[in-house]
Image: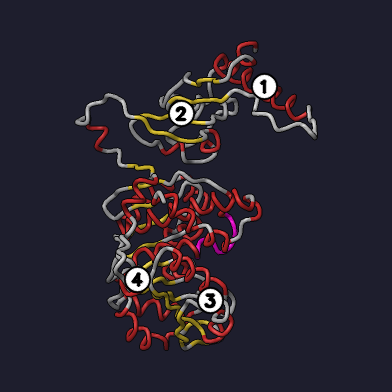
């Protein structure tokens, strides 16, 4: 206890990645003692409140975990109740899934990956292809912005979204695409949605489409077939609804050559009702499901999706031949060739309606500028996560709404581009 009270730093290096839970009693007792002492130190600090005094730095020592916090299963994310909550975890060679899966992800703090002197020819290393995205990676993925340019230089994005029940989704997606740098964004939707949104989204161009009871109908196919060849990227699904006539439209579109396409939200829900839909895709495709939507696509319940998300993301991206963005804390992006990227962000600021529409718009905007689908998905999801963190700093996580993510995209881009 005296050592804890007199320390500025506690290094947790009792165990590495090979533990079995639960921890042995003697080890659990050591961690429990440290945890109780830290809790007592924090409670004392809270009790001594001097209103007029300047805020003092935290008196508790920082906790640095080596490889993973002791008591964390680095494969599953399971955690021993006595484990310490680290401020930072330095892990070696590669990312481990358990560092990014809850409940363990709540114990690791900031994650850093450090190299060690292991032969690159080691067979086991060739099987590790999990990458943690960082700002330098994303900077290299962003489309160039030549000074001698016009709106056509940066691509045209078409968004097929919105219905009478979910009017705002189309506008959020369109602004996401614009803030990501698209030169022109067009939304195709029900005429009543156009009337409601057009006065508030003056940068967007609009294409009113035939509808039935407020839902985009199968009769829209001819109009879409004429205009879509003029666009560099297509987004289908935000706030689209699940009407049968809309499903028929989607099914017809699957058999039609399309621009590189992002399918989100109700587009995914409708896709899940079409047998062997992946065999009918004619263009590069990005899917952006949350765990519930992923469950509908795979026939697996949401709990199992979360529990096995690493395996599912990689397996289904390869099986379906698409880029898969499996959303959540530490979003995963999987490619058709088996690559898997995890984001460093976990923030409840993004747990609010409309943020998924913004993400889909950002990815579409990057694809309109010429970014390849996998790179657009990584860069778009990273910018979205960083914008969520920045918005939380401005408003507090509790108060963030989807429009705040859009408003902080410029700041996120400035940080990435180093301007």
Badge 4 or badge 2: first in the primary sequence: 2
Residue marked by disc 2: 68
Badge 2 or badge 1: first in the primary sequence: 1
Answer few, some or many: residues within 10 Å of disc 2's Cα (few below 14, many 20 plus, some between 14 and 19): many
* 29 on left or right of 15: right
Residue marked by disc 1: 36
Residue marked by disc 4: 233
Q: Where does residue 368 sit, x and y in percent of width and height?
A: 34, 68
Q: Nearer the viewer, residue 188 or 216?
A: 188
Q: Where does residue 264 sit, x and y in percent of width and height?
A: 45, 66
Q: How far is the residue under mark 2 from the one under mark 3?
A: 47 Å
- Quadrant of the frame with the N terminus: top right
Disc on res. 345 = none
Q: Nearer the viewer, residue 403 or 73?
A: 403
Residue pictured at 33% horizontal, 66% vertical: 369
In the image, residue 355 lies in the stretch drawn in magenta: yes
Q: Nearer the viewer, mark 1 or mark 4?
A: 4
Magenta residues, as a range?
351-357
């Amino acid at each position: 206890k005296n050592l804890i009270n007199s320390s500025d730093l506690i290094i947790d290096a009792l165990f590495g990645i090979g533990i079995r839970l639960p921890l042995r009693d003697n080890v659990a007792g050591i961690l429990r003692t440290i945890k109780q002492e830290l809790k007592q130190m924090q409670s004392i600090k809270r009790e001594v409140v001097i209103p007029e005094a300047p805020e003092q730095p935290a008196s508790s020592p920082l906790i640095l975990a080596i490889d993973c916090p002791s008591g964390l299963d680095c494969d599953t994310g399971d955690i021993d109740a006595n484990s310490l909550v680290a401020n930072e975890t330095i892990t070696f060679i590669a990312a481990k899934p358990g560092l990014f899966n809850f409940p363990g992800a709540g114990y690791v703090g900031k994650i850093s990956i450090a190299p060690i002197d292991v032969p690159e020819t080691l067979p086991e290393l060739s099987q590790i292809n999990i990458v943690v995205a960082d700002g330098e990676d994303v900077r290299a993925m962003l489309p160039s912005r030549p000074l001698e340019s016009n709106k056509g230089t940066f691509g045209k994005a078409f968004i097929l979204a919105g219905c009478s029940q979910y009017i705002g989704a189309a506008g959020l997606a369109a602004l996401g695409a614009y803030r990501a740098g698209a030169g022109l964004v067009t939304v195709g939707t029900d005429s009543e949605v156009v009337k409601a949104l057009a006065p508030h989204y003056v940068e967007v161009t609009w294409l009113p489409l035939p509808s039935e009871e407020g839902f985009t109908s199968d009769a829209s196919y001819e109009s879409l077939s004429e205009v879509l060849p003029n666009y560099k990227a297509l987004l289908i699904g935000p706030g689209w609804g699940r009407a049968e006539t809309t499903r028929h439209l989607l099914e017809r579109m699957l058999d039609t050559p399309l621009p590189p396409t992002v399918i989100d939200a109700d587009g995914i829900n409708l896709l899940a009702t079409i047998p062997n839909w992946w065999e009918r895709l004619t263009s590069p495709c990005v899917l952006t499901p949350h765990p519930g939507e992923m469950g509908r696509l795979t026939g697996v319940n949401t709990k199992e999706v979360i529990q096995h998300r690493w395996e599912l993301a990689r397996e289904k991206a390869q099986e379906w031949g698409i880029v898969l963005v499996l959303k959540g804390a530490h979003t995963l992006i999987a490619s058709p060739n088996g690559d898997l990227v995890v984001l460093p962000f976990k923030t409840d600021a993004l747990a609010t309606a409309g943020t998924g529409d913004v993400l889909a718009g950002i990815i579409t905007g990057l694809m309109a500028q010429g970014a390849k689908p996998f790179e657009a998905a990584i860069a778009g999801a990273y910018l979205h996560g960083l914008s969520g963190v920045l918005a939380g700093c401005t408003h507090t996580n509790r108060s963030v709404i989807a429009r705040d993510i859009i408003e902080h995209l410029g700041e996120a881009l400035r940080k990435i581009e180093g301007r």
